[in-house]
């Protein structure tokens, strides 16, 4: 089933087929010494550590450059007000979907983002180390992690996803290609909830640059709107990025 791209400003070739054809040609890679996820569409960059996070690192797929993020932010549609939450339910964003060989999206992200990750026969992460870029915590128990939707599902619903098909929302909720999914501490993810950057920012100010770039990348890819307050907050966070572009 091909994913309609009418609402995607930056469609990814094969993304709809890869995500909506369950298990087709995707295998759950065994964790390597660094926990790198070798599945199609996954980042092959080294896992994020405290040291790399403090120098602007971000888990998952590569972010747009700082200058590109600024241009993307300028181009985002401004909503005068949020769309209604009428009809919203998390179940309308089906997740976590199968990625093949007993792996689901959550376990794929855990393996990708961690170091020294060991998985069992059901692709569940049993040991490893994860660095939470939101609050700077190093976690060694997968039960204390959350696989977070960077742009919360409720936020996406209010900014345009209410008009998507169920298939499009499934792609969004399981997206391994854009920086929409990351492993963070359960505490920080609960504190964030469905708030946007105008109401919640990562406690670690060193994460603001990466957070804003990732947020803008996702909203650009899915043609989601922003409010004036959200756009202002994102611009302020981009102002914390290093002076030199990367």
Image (tube, rainbow, N blue to C red):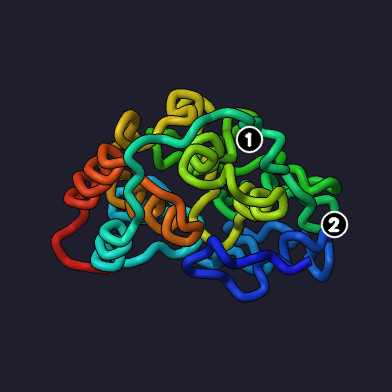
* Quarter where residue 24 is shown: bottom right
How far apart are labels 1 and 2 at the CA level?
Answer: 20 Å
Q: Where residue 160 is drawn, which disc sits there?
A: none
Give the residue displayed 80% in from the left and 46% down from the top.
Answer: 120
Instruction: Choose mark 1 or mark 2, whichever is in front.
Output: 2
Specify which label sits upstream in the sequence, 1 or 2: 2
Q: Position of residue 238 (x, y in %)?
A: 23, 51
Residue 29 horizontal side relative to residue 231, left or right: right
Q: Against 48, is 87 above or below?
A: above
- The secondary element bearing badge 2 is classed as loop
- Dot 1 alpha-carbon crowd within 10 angstroms: few under 14, some 14 to 19, many 20 or more: many
Give the residue displayed 65% in from the left and 60% down from the top.
Answer: 32
Using the image as rendered, state which of residue 175 and residue 2 is in the foreground: 2
- Dot 2 alpha-carbon crowd within 10 angstroms: few under 14, some 14 to 19, many 20 or more: some
Q: Against 12, is 168 above or below?
A: above
Using the image as rendered, state which of residue 88 and residue 237 is in the foreground: 88
Using the image as rendered, state which of residue 121 and residue 162 is in the foreground: 162
On the rendered image, what quadrant is the C terminus found in?
A: bottom left
On the rendered image, what quadrant is the N terminus found in?
A: bottom right
Q: Disc 2 marks which residue?
A: 101
Residue 75 horizontal side relative to residue 35, left or right: left
Give the residue displayed 30% in from the left and 57% down from the top.
Answer: 73
Q: Disc 1 marks which residue?
A: 142
Give the residue displayed 59% in from the left and 47% down from the top.
Answer: 163
């Amino acid at each position: 089933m091909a994913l309609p791209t009418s609402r995607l400003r930056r469609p990814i070739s094969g993304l709809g087929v890869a995500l909506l054809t369950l298990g087709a040609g995707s295998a759950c890679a065994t964790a390597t010494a660094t926990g790198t996820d070798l599945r199609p569409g996954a980042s092959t960059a080294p896992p994020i550590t405290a040291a790399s996070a403090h120098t602007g690192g971000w888990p998952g797929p590569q972010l747009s450059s700082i200058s590109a993020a600024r241009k993307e932010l300028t181009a985002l549609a401004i909503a005068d007000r949020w769309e209604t939450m009428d009809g919203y339910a998390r179940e309308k964003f089906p997740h976590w979907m199968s990625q093949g060989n007993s792996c689901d999206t959550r376990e794929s992200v855990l393996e990708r983002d961690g170091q020294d990750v060991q998985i069992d026969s059901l692709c569940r992460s049993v040991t490893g180390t994860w660095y939470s870029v939101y609050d700077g915590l190093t976690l060694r128990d997968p039960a204390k992690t959350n696989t977070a939707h960077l742009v919360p599902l409720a936020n996406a619903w209010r900014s345009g996803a209410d008009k998507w098909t169920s298939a499009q929302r499934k792609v969004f909720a399981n997206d391994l290609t854009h920086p929409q999914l990351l492993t963070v501490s359960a505490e920080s993810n609960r504190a964030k909830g469905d708030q946007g950057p105008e109401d919640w920012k990562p406690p670690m100010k060193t994460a603001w640059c990466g957070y804003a770039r990732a947020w803008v990348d996702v909203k650009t890819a899915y043609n989601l709107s922003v409010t004036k307050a959200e756009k202002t907050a994102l611009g302020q966070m981009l102002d914390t990025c290093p002076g030199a572009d990367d």
